[in-house]
Image: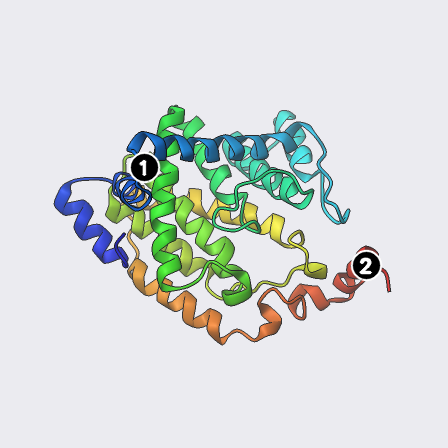
Amino acid sequence: MVNYGYELLEVCNKRHISICEYTLEEEAKTTGLTYEQVFEKMRKNLQVMKSAAEIGLNNEIISISGIIGGDAYKLNKYLKEGKTLTGDFMVTAMARALSSSEVNASMGNIVAAPTAGSCGIIPAVIISAGEKLSLTEDEMVKALFTATGIGIIIAKNATLSGAEGGCQAECGSAAAMASAAAVEMMRGTPEQALNAAAIVFKNILGLVCDPIAGLVEVPCAKRNVAGAISALTTADMVMAGVISKIPFDDTVEAMYKIGKKMPSEFRETALGGLAITETGLKLKKQVFGK
């Protein structure tokens, strides 16, 4: 697998292939599996994602701590009332992002893509975009390979961990991966996909990781919603011809440097930000007692 986005573009453009095709090839080479075997393994990931993204829509899933739960159900109920401002597509994507986060917080089965804390973003984007574009399951599986290709490059040059780089590294990376995947689902070019990932990163730089009581619940679940919406709206921007003035590789480097400069209080330690507000500390006491 190449190390940088510019190298990815060179390979894809030279061979006239998509990011998903390149990533699939590289995974087959690395694992020694056939294309079909690699593809079917990824299909299983999609199936788990679908389940996690849907279960909370019709069931009130409550986290183990009791801090979050039932919000995906509320959004789906609201959707059915036909009073949404942003429309059925966006609200459904929001609900799916919350559902996956709630399933994660209740110790359910999710795909940590790229992390458990950001697990709702990629499913919400790919499943919702797939439905909107009338794509097949195979095409949604291919989109997961696109997201994977972007994620590998981020991991090679920066981090996907909130403990190392803040929430910009978790939800930011997930949203960048998802937006690139959405672009290829819309038949965009590899260059457009990387533009989308770059724009998403630019818009989330500096986001801290400050989980209440150290749990991946508040504000994490709602940040999954924000990440999914950012990915989808950015895909539309790019497909309209908007480009990122800062290349993808530069945004990844910037994210990493910013993360390294963040005080430890803002990197998943629950020692800063929302975690130490008056209400944040009350919620912590509610979960763990004195």
Neighbours of disc 1 within 10 Å: few (<14), some (14-19), many (20+):
few
Picture quadrant of residue 26: top left
Picture quadrant of residue 74: top right
Q: Nearer the viewer, residue 163 or 13?
A: 163
Q: In the rendered view of the protein, which quadrant contains the C terminus?
A: bottom right
Residue depicted at x 34% and y 42%:
146
| Callouts 1 and 2 close, C-beta under 8 Å | no
Residue depicted at x 35% and y 29%:
139
Q: Name the residue under label 1.
A: 33
What percent of the width, then of the height, locates residue 2? 25, 55
Residue depicted at x 21% and y 51%:
9
Left or right? Give the position of 250 relative to 287.
left
Q: Name the residue under label 2.
A: 288
Q: In this view, does 215 lie above or below 35?
A: below
Left or right? Give the position of 89 relative to 197.
right
What percent of the width, then of the height, locates residue 178? 42, 44
Count of numbered tags: 2
What percent of the width, then of the height, locates residue 240? 30, 42
What's the amino acid at mark 1? Leu
Q: Which of 119 and 45 is in front in this view?
A: 45
What's the amino acid at mark 2? Phe
Q: Nearer the viewer, residue 109 or 167?
A: 109
Residue lying furthest left in this view? 14
Left or right? Give the position of 127 relative to 38.
right
Closer to the eye: label 1 or 2: 1
Q: Identify the secondary structure beneath mark 2.
A: helix
What percent of the width, then of the height, locates residue 287? 80, 55
Neighbours of disc 2 within 10 Å: few (<14), some (14-19), many (20+):
few
Q: Which of marks 1 and 2 is nearer the N terminus?
A: 1
Q: Identify the secondary structure beneath mark 1.
A: loop
